[in-house]
Image: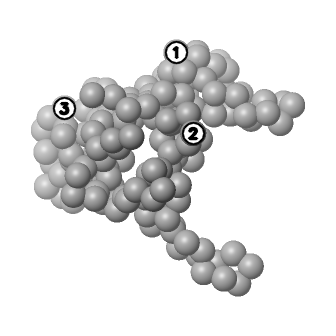
């Protein structure tokens, strides 16, 4: 598979009461219950919906130079001037009009995409490998509870 290009949000996983992992597409996720906020508080609901819309707007860019960008859309209602000020102050970085962290390294191993998560630590006293397998047998790029599919 050619991993280079844009990957777009496909679904987000949640644990059901039965302990099963269930994936929701964008529409299902946006419409799903919000038990961790006061759903009677219009401002809290609006904030949560804005966060969910940013989440489903996430993209990944896998570049031929061995770098990978995790991109988040600029929140609704933020002006170009506000974005320019935040960039100038070093508060955010933009790539292709979206907010991003520092690029991550990626490589192909045995036909699957791996990337350097940047997460360092120990497991049972041994250094943990920050490289994680990103793609599964179904062709999804998996990151945390998110699944992405190859776009353009």
Earlier-in-chain disc, 1 versus 3: 1
Element type at marker 1?
Answer: helix
State the residue position of label 3. Answer: 79
**Going by the image, does 138 lie left or right of 149?**
right
Assess disc 1: are there few (<14), some (14-19) or many (≥20) residues with their C-alpha within 10 Å of its C-alpha: few
Earlier-in-chain disc, 2 versus 3: 3
State the residue position of label 2. Answer: 137
For marks 2 and 3, give the CA distance: 41 Å
**Going by the image, does 98 lie left or right of 59?**
left
Element type at marker 3?
Answer: loop
At a point 48% along the width and 56% down the height, the residue shown is: 110
Element type at marker 2?
Answer: loop
Q: Tell which residue pokes out farthest to the front in this image.
A: 110
For marks 1 and 2, give the CA distance: 25 Å
| Image vertical order of residue 28 relative to residue 85, above or below | above
* Residue 74 visible to the viewer: yes
- Classify residue 17 by image quadrant: top right
Q: Quadrant of the N terminus?
A: top left
* Residue 82 visible to the viewer: no
Q: Which dot, 2 or 3, sits closer to the camera?
A: 2
């Amino acid at each position: 598979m050619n991993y280079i290009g844009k990957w777009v949000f496909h679904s987000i996983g949640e644990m059901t009461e039965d302990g099963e992992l269930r994936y929701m597409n964008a529409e299902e996720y946006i419409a799903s219950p919000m038990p961790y906020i006061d759903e009677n508080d219009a401002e809290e609901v609006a904030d949560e919906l804005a966060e969910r819309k940013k989440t489903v707007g996430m993209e990944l860019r896998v570049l031929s130079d061995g770098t990978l960008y995790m991109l988040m859309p600029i929140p609704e209602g933020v002006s170009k001037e506000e974005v320019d000020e935040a960039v100038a102050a070093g508060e955010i970085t933009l790539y292709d009009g979206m907010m991003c962290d520092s690029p991550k390294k990626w490589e192909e191993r045995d036909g699957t995409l791996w990337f350097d998560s940047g997460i360092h630590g120990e497991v049972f006293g041994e250094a943990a490998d920050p490289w994680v397998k990103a793609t599964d047998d179904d062709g999804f790029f998996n990151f945390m509870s998110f699944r992405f599919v190859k776009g353009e």
